[in-house]
Image (cartoon, rainbow, N blue to C red):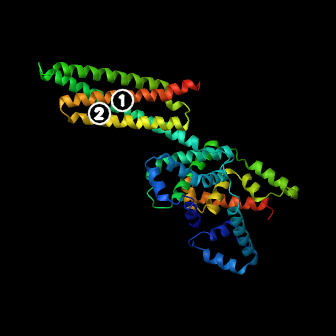
Amino acid sequence: MNPHLELEQLLALREPGAEPGDAALRDHLASCAECRAEAERLDQLQARLRALPVLRPTRDRWPAVRARLAADRRRVWWRRAGLASAGMAAALAGLILGNSFRSATPPDAAGVTGAAAEIARAKESSQALEQLLQQYDPDSRIIDGRTDRIAQELENRIAAVDRELQQTAAADEAERNAAALRLWRERVGLLDALVDVHVTRASNVGL
Amino acid sequence: MTRTLLMDSLLPADADAVLAGARTGDPASLEALYRAFEVPVYHLARRLCRTAEDAEDVMQETFFEVCRSIRQYRGDGSLWGWVRSIAASKALMRLRRNRYRETDELHDDFVAARREAPHLRMDLEAALERLPETSRAVVWLHDVEGYTHEEIASMMGRTTSFSKSQLARAHRRLRCWLNE
């Protein structure tokens, strides 16, 4: 029988908390110089492991992390924007149809119809630009930090316009049409700028 | 514990503002988080992974997860403890995915060669590198990072006994290779 402690037993004695049989092992350790020396070697090895030099990365990975975060954020944004856009278009179509059935000869029928047509055109432009961007697939492209910041700012502003559009439902008809037309036009302008940021810049640098 | 708290001191003086900014997705705050923990995360990943490339990939994965999930950090424990657990988990995932060849024959050959040629005595760095991946991960997580066998077993999806036996195996080999 080996009179000395096994490595596993020495390691177990270093663990917090007492296990059954620990007392006997500790008694042996206290009385055995050879096992104490072995335990000391274990402590020294642990200390040496902790003292190993700190290893540092040779490359800065932040740009890659940032680009991936931006792509992730865009994916979420497009998903939300797509749903919001479809929802808004449906709501607006409902409102316009509802108006046309509500009154045969409204006092400003020509104005309302004109606004509805303008809104429909702006909406079509907005959808065409969104399709263009989706086809271009900005997520799969490499963009520099400055372009990314501009794109992010434009996406945030489009999201703000979408929120305003949802709130126009509470206004009366004339106000609603005027606000919707203004906001849809603004949305088209922002999307146009976003396409410019992605597509035009990419063309310029030959991506 | 001390080590963990020391790591949190790597954050800028306005740590609360950085954390609050990071939770809103502010790019400057997220970058400040990255800069604060870049080196310790890489160091941990490199000690667990076989290659520098793997360690850098683990670092990237870790910070992507940290930035995306920072809202989930409630401040219950230290921030470094939270970041470190993500890094360790990503590194162990990488080890499982790569499944490097860990043949005992390879290591036993090496040990036999060392016995025959004492001048091949290794330094600790080389010996650690030479350990099979699982043993190296266990010895590093336990002896350096201070994880318990229960925590290591949980992270690795193995039993506590497995963690304990891997630690003993690693120590036995290190001692042999270091000629101690």
**Residue placed at 61% from the left, 77% from the top?**
A23
Q: Is residue B159 visible?
A: no
> To which quarter of the image does residue A63 belong?
top right
**Disc 1 vs disc 2: Cβ atoms closer than 8 Å?**
yes
Image quadrant assignment for residue B153: bottom right
Mark 1 residue type? Arg
Using the image as rendered, state which of residue A31 and residue A46 is in the foreground.
A46
Q: Earlier in the sequence, mark 1 or mark 2?
A: 2
Letter of the chain that mark 2 sits on in the rendering: A
B49 left or right, relative to B82 = right
Can see residue A111? yes
- Element at badge 2? helix
- Residue matched to label 2: A165
Task: Identify the residue at horizontal 45%, vertical 37% (top origin).
Answer: A152
Residue at 80% across / 50% down in the picture?
B109
Type of amino acid under label 2:
Leu
Q: Residue A28: x, y in percent?
A: 69, 78
Residue A179 as seen in the image, left or right of residue B41: left
* Vertical position of residue A93 compared to residue A32: above or below: above
Residue A126: percent from left, percent from top: 37, 25
Disc 2: CA contacts within 10 A as few (<14), some (14-19) or many (>=20): many
At mark 1, the secondary structure is helix
Hey, which quadrant is residue A62 in on the image? top right
Task: Name the spot of residue A135 as percent of width and height, x first.
Answer: 47, 23
Question: Which chain letter matches label 1?
Answer: A
Image disc number at residue B90:
none
The residue singled out by tag 1 in the image is A187
In the rendered view, tell whether residue A92 sits above or below residue B32. Answer: above
Quarter of the image for the C terminus of chain B: give it: bottom right
